[in-house]
Image (cartoon, rainbow, N blue to C red):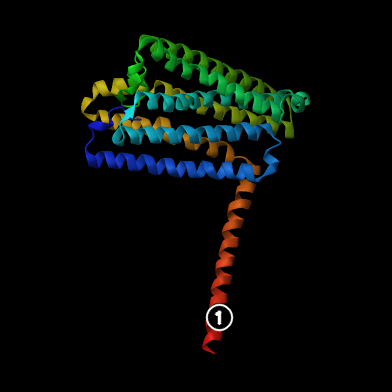
Amino acid sequence: MNSTGRLDKWNSAFAKNFITFALGFIINCINGAFVYTYFKSQVFYRDPRYVLYIHLVINDMIMLTLSVLLQIMTYTIPTSLASCCILLLILVTANKNSPLNLAGMAVKRYIAVCRPLHHVQICTVQRAYALIALIWVVSFIPALTDILIILATQPPSVFSRVVVCYPLNVYTTPYHKAQSVVVQILLLSFVFLTLIITYLKVLCAAWAVSGSNQASARNARNTILLHGVQLLICMLTFISPFINVLLATAWPREITSIFFTSFLFTNVLPRLLSPLIYGVRDQKFNTHIRLHFCCKFSSSEEKRVKLRVGARRGSKQVLH
């Protein structure tokens, strides 16, 4: 979502869009492999941890697809304010889903380690779906509020105006800025405190237990720590517009490169973290991915070999 994309020359614009599209396509293919594995293996349906994990992956795919789409649209397709608001409504909602989903996964880990006797009763698949629905509702309200502020402060004709579809270009009133600051502070403070408290609780549990339980607590502690890393990257997404303004003020001639580089590191590349952190580290997911993709690849190769052998035999019989 480069707000200054139209200042680029054609070659530069094409190169940036190609890089963005290629990275987005590759990352979505990787994430899609995990989504495919999840829906092909019923064993994951019964574990709320995997339900929350796959929601995070699908949410990242939605964010990445819309981010790349808006990035390309700023160079190619004039966008009306009405269309832009609809796209931003989905994108902003998905963007706020990620830290809340991380908080839910951290709490689930905490219950599994520190409240193992109550884990089965508290952490159910039905409650995981209910939590996902609550996350979407909580994230949707601020995104909808942005549009309601435009409706309250601007005439209806403004929605036919052509804009560069970037939040700072669309949501420009003081009410938008105040609402954005308040929501981001409350959201990130809640998630940050949740991660810190659950991490400290799990850390204490790791010190108190021994044997296999200690290994489980250590694994949970490392996972929650990785949640914190992801949260820091989510924070980069929120503060990147302010960083862009500071860098653009210092180096005005490099403004398009600054926005493009910031877009890659805060919107595109972080979407690869979820499968790497959870899918690759998780033994069960690793096993099922190999089962689905490696076996299919080997079976397709066997079919090709059999077809080639059959074709050769058929040609020999025709010659004889």
Find residue 92 and report its horizontal and vertical position in percent: 46, 24
**Visible residue check, residue 115:** yes
Could you say which quadrant of the image residue 129 lies in?
Answer: top right
- Say which of 165 and 11 sits in front: 165
Residue at 39% over, 44% down: 22
Tell me the residue that label 1 is attached to: 314
235 to the left or right of 171: right
Q: Check the picture and name the quadrant holding the C terminus.
A: bottom right
Find residue 300 and report its horizontal and vertical position in percent: 57, 62
Q: Check the picture and name the quadrant holding the N terminus.
A: top left
Q: Is residue 77 above or below residue 186?
A: below
Residue at 60% over, 21% down: 134
Could you say which quadrant of the image residue 286 lies in?
Answer: top right
Q: Is residue 181 above or below residue 222?
A: above
Residue at 73% over, 35% down: 212
Q: Which secondary structure lies at badge 1? A: helix
Find residue 238 and report its horizontal and vertical position in percent: 42, 21
**Visible residue check, residue 109:** no
